[in-house]
Amino acid sequence: MSARLRTCVLGVIAIGATIAGCSSLGYYAQAARGQMQLLRHREPITEVIEQPDTKESLKATLRLVLEIRDYASAELALPDNNSYRTYVDIKRPYVVWNLFAAPEFSIDPKRWCFPWVGCLSYKGYFDEAKARAAGDKLAAEGDDVYVGGIAAYSTLGHFDDPFLSSMLRLDENVTAGIVFHELAHQRVYIRDDTELNEAFASLVEEEGVERWLTARRGPEALVSWHQRREREQAFADIVDAARKRLGELYASGLPAEQMRARKAEEIDALRARYSELKASWGGYAGYDAWFDSGLNNARISSVATYQRLVPALRVLLADAGNDLPTFYARVDALGGLTAAERSKQLDALLARAGSEAPSTPGSALSGSTNGR
């Protein structure tokens, strides 16, 4: 596991293609083409299951998807619409490739702003070559860059999102998590706050899978899921600790050459911490690809985007008596605050999370981009 298998809103920016400025027209055009291609090829899952040439393994997976989809609305109070009730074979391993970038001496990712959805800390492409070309251009300008494949994304309810063939290689827990995660983006979306949106969807994913397994699969499945979450949390913790140390370094005012050398030392230290962590897992190597494909500010900050605020929202869920509709309403209310007010409240919740109890394992990353 190394990079996320999903993102929240790439497809919806296609809506803005007709009003984009000329400098962005090429980017919007590829987004529009990619989104429309998915919409044209959607087939109802029930019809795919009934087709005589559909493989039995695919039929079984799609039946499970419909079970998960029904559970999401009935038990998790997530939107009841046609999303994930249709299927598309995209004939490639990932549906989009996300571009993350950050300055050489900053842990804050670059942000791109789009009509309706606001500003995001990543930029998505339906074509891998275009994503990497855009990344190469930013790298030539001095930025740290990371491009990762994504198996699923949400259009925030603007379209009925299909279940994609890129999601078929995932196990049941991850499949359920992706469906819950993406539907959560349809339930609550706060403009210009990628970090909060992704933390919210990640916590709904975590809570949803926990409840799904408890209701449908029993104790043995929960043990496996908890082990996965513990590893994900441990991975996220060492990456976040490195991010904080790098932030302190970049604020130190050291000359560029010294800072560059110290940055390399911190990245080497992160690799060493991962080696220790892997040894404690008995050699489990699920994050090797993440470490082997180049560590920099962009890759490190992409983990923080999804995970940092999860403990704060877990406190908010507990305050809501673990009632999901009440929790959703409270997160939605945060969107009505100014950015400064929202940050103050989230910092207070993070402080409570640190003082009341150790953070329980969270779903920092759940997918494999080889990757995952």
Image: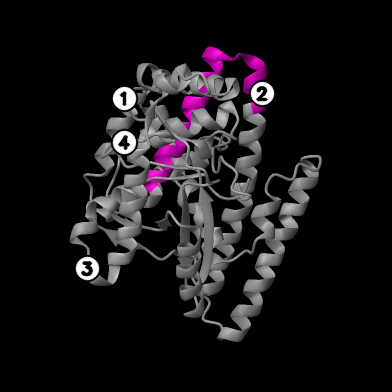
Closer to us: mark 4 or mark 2?
A: 4
Q: Position of residue 333 (x, y in %)?
A: 25, 38
Nearer the N terminus, badge 2 or badge 1? 2
Q: Is residue 207 magenta?
A: yes
- Circle 2: element type: helix
What mark, if any, has residue 186 been given in the picture? 4
Closer to us: mark 4 or mark 1?
A: 4
Q: Amino acid at mark 3?
A: Gly
Give the Cα distance between marks 2 and 1: 27 Å
Give the Cα distance between marks 3 and 2: 51 Å
Q: Is residue 293 above or below residue 46?
A: below
Nearer the N terminus, badge 4 or badge 2? 4
Q: Residue furthest front?
A: 53
Q: Residue furthest left?
A: 19
What mark, if any, has residue 278 been given in the picture? none
Q: Amino acid at mark 1?
A: Pro
Q: Which residue is mark 3?
A: 21
Q: What secondary structure is the stretch in magenta mostly built from?
A: helix
- Circle 1: element type: helix
Residue located 53% across and 70% down the image:
144
Q: Amino acid at mark 2?
A: Val
Nearer the N terminus, badge 3 or badge 4? 3
Residue located 22% across and 68% down the image:
21
Give the Cα distance between marks 4 and 2: 30 Å
* Span shown in magenta: 196-224
Q: Which one is in front, 237 or 74?
A: 74
